[in-house]
Image: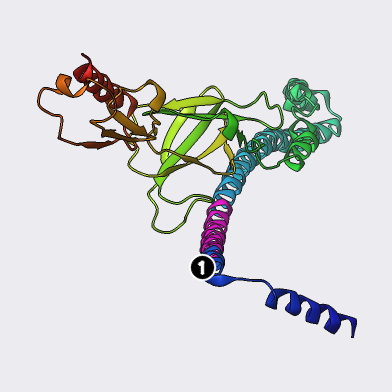
Amino acid sequence: ENENVTVGKACFLISNVTTGPEALQRIISTLANKNDEIQNFIDTLNHTLKGVQENSSNILSELDEEFDSLYSILDEVKESMINCIKQEQARKSQELQSQISQCNNALENSEELLEFATRSLDIKEPEEFSKYVCVYHRVTMASAFRLSLKPKVSDNMTHLMVDFSQERQMLQTLKFLPVPKAPEIDPVECLVADNSVTVAWRMLEEDNKIDHFILEHRKTNFDGLPRVKDERCWEIIDNIKGTEYTLSGLKFDSKYMNFRVRACNKAVAGEYSDPVTLETKALNFNLDNSSSHLNLKVEDTCVEWDPTGGKGQESKMKGKENKEFLIHFEAVPSDIFLFIYMTFTFYLLP
């Protein structure tokens, strides 16, 4: 019930407001402009959404490539270490196999000598035993006595063990690159001159890792937020070391210019600043009536000849007494205006 009373009061107040065609036209124009801004904002959001999808896809691909590169390096290192272990295994196995073979040969020879020497001990006759004198020499020269019973290699393989705890910690600290914060363009410090624009910005947080800035600009005929559709491409000025830049030699063939800037470190560029729109119309001049010639009627940017402006001035115009002329100075560059004004004043001097 209270809400109905409030709405009724509001309707009563609105109905009692004298609108009129002019007021209605203004509110219609305001609403149309607002709708245009909303549509531009929707276009901006759609453009940003598309950029998020495309950039995310690109970043994911780059991330896969980086990890694939890490995997490839790890696979190469693993393969190299496996080869080292296998080579060491083969070397030690070969040494041990060689020793085993030597021992088996020595053992076989020793068994033959033992059998032969044992038979010689069973001989009782001295004459017959003398025939086996060489047995002593053969036994003393047995290869078993020259054989080393110490392994040439050990079974220890600890010299090829690994500890990747530090590397694991390093891998666990993997993170995204530190991205610089977005700068802020200061419109108060920006200056629009005849044919140049000076853009100034600042960092909201100090960052000593910033290497340079990238300034982008484009011309537009729309005030407010930059338009996504029907706009010119951004022009890029790279490798700016300071926080101020002056674009000179411009041709102001549009009403406004959009500007945005981003900070870069050695690895990556940061977010763009909020765009700023500056008006770039040519300078307007207002003429001073109090200091003008007596026969000149000056109103802002309009100069009109007035033959009744002063006494005795008609004879000095060389027959131009009855001729009236009108000159408008609107959006005239300063150098051309000064030339015209000085020439015109000189012409009227006595």
Q: For the image shown, how many numbered marks are present on the structure? A: 1
Magenta stretch prevailing secondary structure: helix
Task: Determine whether, in the image, residue 264 is placed left or right of residue 293.
Answer: right
In front of the other: 125 or 33:
33
Task: Determine whether, in the image, residue 36 is placed left or right of residue 324.
Answer: right
Q: Measuring from the top left, give residue 126's x and y in whole percent.
A: 82, 23
Magenta stretch: residue 44 in it?
Answer: yes
In front of the other: 311 or 255:
311
Q: Measuring from the top left, give residue 301's x and y in whole percent.
A: 35, 35
What quarter of the picture does the C terminus occupy?
top left
User: Does residue 14 lie above or below 257 as drawn?
Assistant: below
In front of the other: 135 or 45:
45
Q: Measuring from the top left, give residue 29's x and y in whole percent.
A: 51, 65
Q: Residue at x 53, y 69 (%)?
A: 28
Q: Residue furthest right?
A: 2
Q: Is residue 288 visible?
A: no
What quarter of the picture does the N terminus occupy?
bottom right
In front of the other: 62 or 27:
27
**Type of amino acid at the residue the image marks with label 1:** Gln
Mark 1 secondary-structure assignment: helix
Q: Which residue is mark 1?
A: 25
Q: Is residue 241 visible?
A: yes
Q: Residue at x 78, y 34 (%)?
A: 166
> Magenta part of the protein: which range?
32-60
